[in-house]
Image (tube, coloured by chain):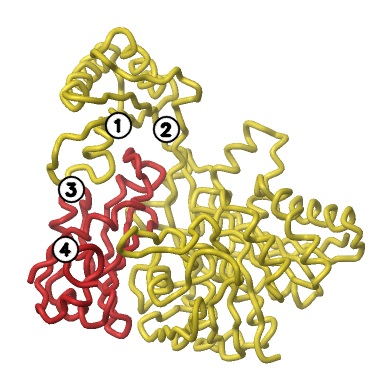
């Protein structure tokens, strides 16, 4: 096999569905890969399932995505790797098998990869929280979930066992893309150079449109053609792991040195040591060559032996945030907003708001960059935005209640929304720890449509 | 001539826990030496004073004409705890673009954006 074509199908839970269907239909793909999990996805799903026993525990857009891509993937022999299984990949596999039958394709093997959940054992497996150095055992009372980031091995086992579709719980994002390469090319699991190169390509693909012109445009400086019509990337991967990144003809966006460079460093800290479960990737030797319009060759990414540990993400209940905003415009807008702030601060004292953290910003002035915002001319419009972090839901609700009062008991010419949503959200803090590889036993369960 | 970084480089921020990283990329390789010499970790930290509360590490990748700034304690305790409206810090990369860099006048034709060059 000379090259394989791997297309991206999603970069996060809320991503667009149409570009995945275009890739499935017109991408001449061998593989379509979905990445739908954020750092807090598992803990948020656990909390939701506790409240809503009917929540199946997998990507809430699983049906939308599968209905859009499966007809093409099944007709064209495109295999799928997806982390849409969240906290219940077995149920997701059942659902996907149901879709396959419904679309007239019996006998399709669908595998569920699971086994990374360590919630009950993490306090005995891990000593210290990476971020704070504090004891993991100290989180026990408020812990919602703890899951290890799995690597390629269970996905490879599923593919070797004939799975056409693999749906997983938590797996490191680049591993979702690396597994098809290792399966197709037969790389050894200690071939660090190829695993590094392949993981680097996976890293570039995992955020979808962020390498094809999304999260990029800056008018007059970085212009993107037809940015409403962005495609998800496709990688033509060779047997050495080097790849050409491209996208479907007729779509908007761009793939060039600039988009690839920005994405290469996205969420990377030390570029010489990007740790995945499979390999330690070295991006510092990357070569990025524009071969043609929207065709960029990426090669030279290095790899070093994997670490003896796996990263575990620990979700912890940490209280609530109450937040809301209201508005001013015209001459004196900022002055009225500042008076409103002082009224709010006094009223929070009157109602005894017990907040661990409180923030009142002027959107249009300093709400995003805070104290790093330079002084500028007074804005024509200002939103006052207030947020407080509290221990209880009732305390957090005080924020919205006091903002309500600003409608008639506040400042002149206050623009205010009628509350149409719960202005309180739960905070699930995410911490990290390391566990020995031997502590984690991934599982593979096979279904058939 | 002194120009805002925005005319010679582009940037992207990413989040992990309470750490924000900002990649800075020269539009043209010719701009990179000046950026590397002048946009130190200290200068970056000064631009984000009050927002970035921990240390800033800078990783220079000369082969790609790229600098990666890793800013600790930059996201209000972490994405889910952060009371900032932009809790992921997606907009943070923009702030560094107004830092001024001294460049050789002969590079003026390579400047991006409005004004001389381009």
Identify which residue, A389 or A36, lies in the foreground.
Answer: A36
Determine if marks 2 and 4 fall on one subunit.
no
Determine if marks 3 and 2 fall on one subunit.
yes
Residue at mark 3 to residue at mark 4: CA–CA distance? 16 Å
The residue pinned by badge 3 equals A372
Dot 4 falls on a residue whose secondary structure is strand
Determine if marks 3 and 1 fall on one subunit.
yes
Q: Position of residue B66 (x, y in %)?
A: 29, 75
Q: Quadrant of residue A171?
A: bottom right
User: Is A188 placed above or below B41 here?
Assistant: below
Closer to the camera: disc 2 or disc 4?
4
Chain painted red: B
Chain painted yellow: A
The residue pinned by badge 1 equals A356
Q: Position of residue B81 (x, y in %)?
A: 37, 41
User: Is A52 placed above or below A150 here?
Assistant: above
Closer to the camera: disc 4 or disc 1?
4
Dot 2 falls on a residue whose secondary structure is strand
Dot 1 falls on a residue whose secondary structure is strand
The chain holding disc 4 is: B
In the picture, the disc for residue B4 is 4
The chain holding disc 1 is: A
């Amino acid at each position: 096999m000379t090259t394989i074509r791997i297309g991206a199908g999603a970069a996060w839970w809320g991503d667009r569905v149409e570009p995945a269907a275009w890739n499935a239909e017109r991408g001449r793909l061998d593989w379509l890969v979905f990445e739908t999990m954020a750092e807090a996805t598992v803990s948020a799903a656990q909390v939701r399932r506790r409240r809503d026993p009917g929540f199946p525990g997998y990507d809430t857009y699983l049906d939308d995505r599968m209905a859009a891509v499966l007809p093409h993937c099944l007709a064209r022999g495109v295999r799928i790797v997806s982390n849409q299984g969240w906290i219940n990949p077995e149920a997701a596999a059942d659902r996907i098998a149901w879709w396959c039958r419904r679309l007239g394709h019996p006998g399709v093997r669908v595998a569920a990869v699971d086994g990374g959940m360590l919630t009950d054992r993490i306090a005995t497996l891990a000593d210290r929280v990476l971020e704070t150095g504090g004891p993991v055992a100290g989180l026990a009372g408020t812990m919602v979930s703890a899951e290890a980031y799995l690597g390629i091995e269970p996905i490879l086992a599923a593919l070797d066992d004939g799975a056409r579709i693999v749906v997983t719980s938590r797996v490191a994002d680049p591993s979702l893309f690396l597994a098809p390469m290792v399966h197709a090319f037969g790389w050894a699991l200690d071939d660090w150079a190829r695993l590094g190169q392949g993981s680097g390509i996976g890293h570039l693909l995992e955020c979808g449109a962020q390498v094809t012109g999304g999260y990029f445009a800056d008018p007059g400086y970085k212009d993107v053609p037809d940015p409403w019509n962005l495609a998800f990337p496709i990688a033509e991967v060779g047997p050495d792991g080097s790849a050409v990144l491209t996208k479907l003809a007729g779509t908007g966006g761009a793939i060039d040195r600039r988009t690839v460079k920005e994405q290469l460093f996205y969420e990377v800290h030390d570029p010489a040591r990007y740790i995945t479960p499979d390999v330690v990737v070295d991006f510092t030797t990357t070569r990025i060559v524009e071969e043609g319009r929207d065709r960029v060759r990426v090669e030279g990414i290095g790899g070093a032996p994997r670490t003896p540990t796996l990263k575990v993400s620990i979700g912890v209940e940490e209280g609530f945030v109450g937040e809301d905003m209201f508005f001013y415009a015209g001459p004196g807008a900022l002055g009225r907003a500042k008076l409103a702030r002082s009224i709010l601060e006094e009223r929070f004292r009157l109602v005894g708001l017990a907040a661990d953290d409180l923030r009142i910003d002027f959107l249009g002035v300093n709400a995003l960059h805070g104290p790093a915002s330079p002084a500028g001319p007074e804005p024509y419009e200002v939103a006052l935005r207030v947020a407080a972090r509290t221990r209880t839901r009732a305390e957090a609700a005080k924020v919205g209640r006091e903002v309500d009062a600003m409608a008639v008991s506040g400042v002149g010419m206050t623009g205010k929304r009628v509350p149409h949503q719960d202005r309180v959200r739960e905070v699930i803090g995410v911490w990290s720890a390391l566990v020995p590889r031997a502590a984690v036993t991934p599982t593979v369960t096979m279904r058939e449509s | 001539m002194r120009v805002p970084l925005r005319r010679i480089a582009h940037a992207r921020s990413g989040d992990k826990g309470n750490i924000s990283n900002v990649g800075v990329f020269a539009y043209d390789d010719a701009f990179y030496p000046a950026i590397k010499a002048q946009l130190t970790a200290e200068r970056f930290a000064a631009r984000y004073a009050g927002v970035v509360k921990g240390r800033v590490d800078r990783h220079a990748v000369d082969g790609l004409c790229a600098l990666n700034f890793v800013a600790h304690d930059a996201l209000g305790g972490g994405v889910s705890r952060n009371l900032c409206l932009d809790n992921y810090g997606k907009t943070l990369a923009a702030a560094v673009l107004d830092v001024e860099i001294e460049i050789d006048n002969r590079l003026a034709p390579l400047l991006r954006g409005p004004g001389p060059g381009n």
